[in-house]
Each structure stands twice: as C-alpha cells, then as structure tokens.
Amino acid sequence: MAVTVNNQRVMVALDVPGREEALALGEALRGSGCWLKVGLELYAYAGPQIIQELKALGFPVFLDLKLHDIPTTVERAIRGFVQGGADIINVHCSGGYEMMARAAAAVREEGSKLGTTPKVIGVTVLTSMSEIQFKEEIGVQRDLKEHVVQLAKLAEKAGLDGVVASAQEAGEIRKNTAADFLIVTPGIRPAWSAAQDQARVLTPQAALAAGSSYLVVGRPITRAENPRQALEQLWD
Ligand SMILES: O=C(O)c1cc(=O)[nH]c(=O)n1[C@@H]1O[C@H](COP(=O)(O)O)[C@@H](O)[C@H]1O
C-alpha cells in the first residue's frame, strides 16, 4: 500500500507493554508514512532505546511523556530526550510560561548540536476530560474551550511549536495562533470504532477539517486484527 499524505499526518500510539509488541506493530506499519508515538506504557517497559529502534524502521517518533515539573527539571530531561532521538516531545502547558520557554530553548539548542530540528508541544486539557469533570472535579469555572485556547496562546508565546488538544478545540486554536503552529489531536475515532475512555472525540475527517496538523490514533489501529488495514481504513 502506498504512502499517502494523510498517513503522514497520523501518529500511531504504540500503547503496548513491551518492545516485541511495539516492533511487531512497527513492522506491520513500515512504509506507510505514519509517525509512531512512544507513550508512558511502552517507555516503562522498553526504556529510551525503543526510540532508536523505531527510528531504524524509518519512522519519525513522538515521545509522549507529558513532562510536568519545575523548569530546571523539565529542561534537563528534555536535553536527554533530544539526544535520545525524539522528533517531538511534549510538556504540560499548565507547567507555566517559564517551564515552556526553557523547554523550547533546550530543544532548539540540543537539536542544533545534533544537526536536527526536534519540536516541543504542550498538552492543553486531556481529551479524556469532559466539560463536567473539568468544572466539577477540577473546579475550573472557565469554559473548557476558552481555557484550551488561552493555554495554546501562552504556549505559542513561550516558543513551543504547537499544542496537543482535542479536535473540538482545533478550529478556535487555529484562529488564534500562527498558521504553522502545530495542533496535534488525540481522541480520534473513526465512525467504525468505540470512544473507550476518550471524552472529546471527533472523526479523522472532521479533525482535519477543523485544522488539526496531526491525528493521534491508538487502539482503533493497534488493537485491530490487521493494523495496517485499519490505518488505511481511517478515512472510510
Ligand atoms: O499527548 C497525548 O498524546 C495525549 C493527550 C491527550 O489529551 N489525550 C490522549 O489520548 N493522548 C494520548 O493519545 C493516545 C490515544 O490513544 P487511543 O485513545 O487508543 O486512540 C494515548 O496514547 C494517550 O496517551
């Protein structure tokens, strides 16, 4: 099957408990043009070397560890992750301006030493969170979409390359940030799949139409009997 422009905008979340499972999915998706995402689960079982192993199969890698700590700790960890080969890394926007600004500077500096151009993006409000949880559990009275846009603007000001947000907020973020600001959207569910623990979901087509740059898709592909076919069927 061919590499399509749409596949290049898909990041497949390899949320599996081991190196072998991850590499088997990498083999199945090899040559499709998609990205692979290494998150907390795979990182816990396979360690940082999995990044280079997946890159050796030809994939760009998004390292999704959602860093949220004091500025110095985040900056120093980020330097290590860039040296480890991550192409995109994320931090939580709620860590604040200084943390994000230092993360952005560290990514650029380490990238220039290696002759690479890694990026850092900020998580706004998790796609598993509903409007009701946001207001009643977390206690934020502001409208969720407004909150996400405010965090995206802060991330842009701090020099981040983009944000992670649900596709339901992508349109509003697009209107309020530069055209090349990345919007990475998890919570993508094709019509043929179940929402599971995601709350703010949209279909792949609707996410692209809303202005998302990249779509993060996990279980609809990784739990499918034929992951490669599921990737190609995202647009059905
Ligand atoms: O940063 C992320 O990638 C992320 C942010 C967010 O708000 N919501 C979210 O689901 N994710 C990640 O995106 C992936 C979604 O996986 P599925 O729900 O299986 O498609 C998981 O690996 C999550 O950790």
Image (cartoon, grey):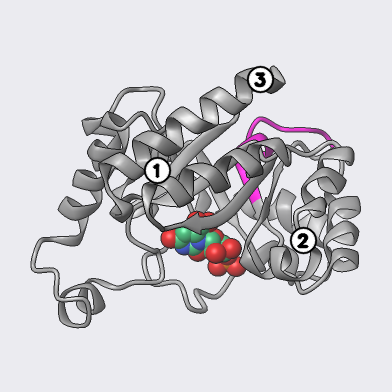
The image quadrant of residue 114 is top right
State which mark lies toward you, 2 or 3: 3
Residue sitting at 71 percent across and 63 percent down? 43
Residue wearing tag 3: 113
Residue 90 drawn above or below residue 218: above
The image quadrant of residue 219 is bottom right
Residue 115 drawn above or below residue 171: above
Q: Secondary structure at mark 1?
A: strand
Few, some or many residues within 10 Å of mark 1 (<14, 14–19, 20+):
many
Relative image position of residue 39 (x, y in whole percent)? 63, 60
User: Considering depth in this image, is 25 or 87 the residue closer to the camera?
Assistant: 87
Residue wearing tag 2: 47
Few, some or many residues within 10 Å of mark 2 (<14, 14–19, 20+):
some
Q: CA distance from mark 3 to mark 1?
A: 25 Å
Residue sitting at 82 percent across and 61 percent down? 22
Relative image position of residue 182 (x, y in whole percent)? 44, 34
